[in-house]
Amino acid sequence: MIRHCREGDQPIAGLLTDLKQRGQLEETLVVWASEMGRTPFRNGGLGKNPGREHNSQALCMWMAGGDVKGGATAGETDDFSLRSVGEAIHIRDVHATLLHLMGLDDKKLEYRHGGRLRKLTDIGGNVLNQIIA
């Protein structure tokens, strides 16, 4: 992870700096996300390739630009970052928030699939207003 974080930090910082200098960061939404989290503890012993397991109970993502409030957070994990605590944030809420930040209303984007009325957030989501500027 140390190597991979180092590989990504400089290009990401460069992208955000460039967008800001050009006055485009306010209209560009940058999202860094994964389909899963990682457990906070190292496994695999002290061998050559110790790692961290997949964690479906908590994950971390970040957004910048668009109409996102800098430094804002949503959700919370336990002291070990192993599980979410408090009210869980569902992926449908993240999707509703992304759609909102792009100027789209999930409630107006319905379509029929397999004889069923569907939405982009599947069963509807709540916008995470605490991260919106």
Image (spheres, grey):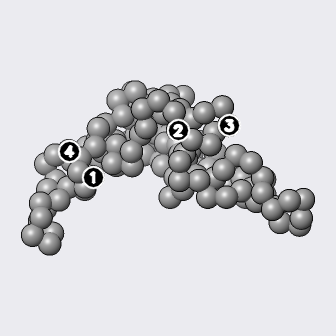
- Separation (CA) of disc 2 from disc 4: 27 Å
**Residue labelled with disc 4:** 105
Query: Disc 2 or disc 1, which is closer to the eye?
Result: 2
User: Residue flagged by tag 4: what amino acid is it?
Assistant: Asp
User: Residue flagged by tag 2: what amino acid is it?
Assistant: Ser
Query: Disc 2 or disc 4, which is closer to the eye?
Result: 2
User: Residue flagged by tag 3: what amino acid is it?
Assistant: Phe
User: Residue flagged by tag 1: what amino acid is it?
Assistant: Thr
- x, y (%) of residue 97? 34, 41
5 vs 36, left or right, is right
**Residue labelled with disc 2:** 84
Q: Are marks 3 and 4 in contact (CB under 8 Å)?
A: no
- Separation (CA) of disc 1 from disc 4: 11 Å
Q: Are marks 2 and 4 in contact (CB under 8 Å)?
A: no
Tag 2 secondary structure: loop
Q: Residue furthest bottom?
A: 114
> Measured along the vertical axis of the image, is residue 37 above or below residue 74?
below
Q: Earlier in the sequence, mark 2 or mark 4?
A: 2
**Residue labelled with disc 1:** 121
- Judge the density around disc 4: few (<14), some (14-19), many (≥20) Cα neighbours within 10 Å: some
**Residue labelled with disc 3:** 80
Q: Are marks 1 and 3 in contact (CB under 8 Å)?
A: no
